[in-house]
């Protein structure tokens, strides 16, 4: 596996850890994205991950060999 994926997984874990420690009032705090709260930014990122997972699931349902291609993509970056 390439060196990128362990970093991606580590960053996702760190994000989950940070978000899980927020107090209720911190979710409404303005983010660095103008007009977006911390909640808005977190929801945006998490929804993108859910959509990506759904796309992969549909592709695999249609053709299980897609998993091989996805794995090779990790290898070649």
Image (cartoon, grey):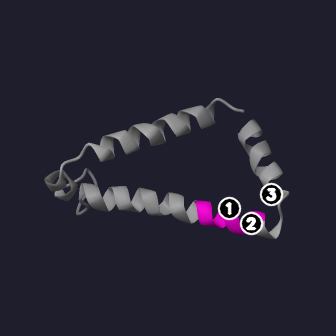
Mark 3 lies on residue? 66
Question: CB under 8 Å between callouts 3 and 1?
Answer: yes
Q: CA distance from mark 2 to mark 3?
A: 7 Å
The residue stretch that appears in magenta: 53-60
Q: Rate crowding at label 3 as few (under 14), some (14 to 19) or many (20 or more) other CA atoms within 10 Å.
A: some
Mark 2 lies on residue? 59
Tell me which corner region of the image, top left, top right, bottom left or bottom right, holds residue 35. Answer: bottom left
**Would you say the magenta stretch is mainly helix, strand or loop?**
helix
Residue at figure coordinates x 18%, y 49% from the top left: 23
Mark 1 lies on residue? 56
Residue at figure coordinates x 59%, y 33% from the top left: 6
Counting from the top left corner in percent of width and height, residue 72 is at: 79, 43
The reply to whether the magenta stretch includes residue 27 is no
Label 1 SS: helix
Question: CB under 8 Å between callouts 2 and 3?
Answer: yes
Residue 16 drawn above or below residue 60: above
Residue at figure coordinates x 52%, y 62% from the top left: 50
Label 2 SS: helix
Does residue 77 appear to the left or right of 53 in the view shown? right
The reply to whether the magenta stretch includes residue 57 is yes
Q: Rate crowding at label 1 as few (under 14), some (14 to 19) or many (20 or more) other CA atoms within 10 Å.
A: some
Question: CB under 8 Å between callouts 1 and 2?
Answer: yes
Tell me which corner region of the image, top left, top right, bottom left or bottom right, holds residue 34. Answer: bottom left
Q: CA distance from mark 3 to mark 1?
A: 8 Å
Label 3 SS: helix
Tell me which corner region of the image, top left, top right, bottom left or bottom right, holds residue 1. Answer: top right
Residue 8 or 21: which is nearer the viewer?
Answer: 21
Residue at figure coordinates x 26%, y 55% from the top left: 38
Residue 12 drawn above or below residue 35: above
Please indicate, yes or no, whether residue 29 appears anywhere in the rendered image: no
């Amino acid at each position: 596996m390439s060196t990128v994926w362990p970093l991606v997984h580590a960053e996702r874990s760190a994000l989950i850890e940070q978000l899980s420690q927020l107090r209720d009032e911190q979710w409404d705090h303005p983010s660095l994205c103008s007009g977006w709260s911390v909640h808005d930014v977190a929801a945006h990122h998490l929804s993108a991950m859910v959509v990506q997972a759904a796309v992969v699931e549909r592709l695999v349902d249609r053709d299980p060999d897609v998993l091989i291609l996805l794995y090779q993509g990790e290898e070649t970056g």
